[in-house]
Image (cartoon, helix red, strand yellow):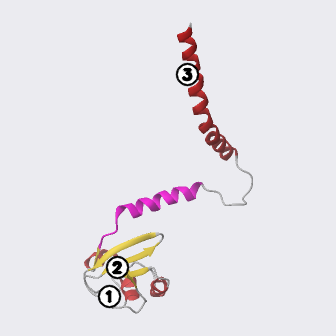
């Protein structure tokens, strides 16, 4: 079975056209080699598919006759995607939520406070430690 048809039939992509486009862009690899949409997939092949900034890794167990239901997908592939890939995507999502786009305007009050806290936080730690050490040395002299 072709790799684009396999990815579509195992529900990695919604349409076969999207799966084919992903293969053309180099987002699908079979056994570490970039695969064109017409590349054949066989049982026990290691496949890596990049989708939504996550590298999904799986082993082909069997070839489905056609598109299968979501509950039956695990019969045809064994998922070996590491958990770190999903955690990295979650952290990336948090950073995107807070970040404002360039040119959106002046910093908000919260942004200004965060910037001031960041800038003051680095300098205050050095000043407070020197003030504390000076006051301790005065107490020792008295």
- Above or below for 103 versus 115: below
Quadrant assignment for the N terminus? bottom left
The residue identified by callout 1 is 41
Label for residue 86?
Answer: none
User: Does the CB distance between marks 1 and 2 fall below 8 Å?
Assistant: yes
Q: Position of residue 49 (x, y in %)?
A: 40, 77
Looking at the image, tell me whether mark 1 or mark 2 is earlier in sequence order. 1
Q: Position of residue 83 (x, y in %)?
A: 35, 62
Question: Label 1: few (<14), some or many (≥20) within 10 Å?
Answer: many
For marks 3 and 2, give the one nearer the viewer. Answer: 3
Q: Going by the image, does 99 lie left or right of 21?
A: right
Helix, strand or loop under label 2:
strand
Question: Label 3: few (<14), some or many (≥20) within 10 Å?
Answer: few
Q: Residue at x 56, y 27 (%)?
A: 129
Q: Position of residue 85 (x, y in %)?
A: 40, 64
For marks 3 and 1, give the one nearer the viewer. Answer: 3
User: Does the CB distance between marks 3 and 2 fall below 8 Å?
Assistant: no
Question: Label 2: few (<14), some or many (≥20) within 10 Å?
Answer: many
The residue identified by callout 3 is 133
The residue identified by callout 2 is 47
The image quarter in which residue 30 lies: bottom left
- Above or below for 105 versus 70: above
Give the alpha-carbon distance from disc 1 to disc 2, as whole Å. Answer: 9 Å
Q: Going by the image, does 60 lie left or right of 117?
A: left
Q: Which residues are magenta?
A: 79-98
Question: Which of 83 and 119 lies nearest the eye of the viewer?
Answer: 119
User: Does the CB distance between marks 3 and 1 fall below 8 Å?
Assistant: no
């Amino acid at each position: 079975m072709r790799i684009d048809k396999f990815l579509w039939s195992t529900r990695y992509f919604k349409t076969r056209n999207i799966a084919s486009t992903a293969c053309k862009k180099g987002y699908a690899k079979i056994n570490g080699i970039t695969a064109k949409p017409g590349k054949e997939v066989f049982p026990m092949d290691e496949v890596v598919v990049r989708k939504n900034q996550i590298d999904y890794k799986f082993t082909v167990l069997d070839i489905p006759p056609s598109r299968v239901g979501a509950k039956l997908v695990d019969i045809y592939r064994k998922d070996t995607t590491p958990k770190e890939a999903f955690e990295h995507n979650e952290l990336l999502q948090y950073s995107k939520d807070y970040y404002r786009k360039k040119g959106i305007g002046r910093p908000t009050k919260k942004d200004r406070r965060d910037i001031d806290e960041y800038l003051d936080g680095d300098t205050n730690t050095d000043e407070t430690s020197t003030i504390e050490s000076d006051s301790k040395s005065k107490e020792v002299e008295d």
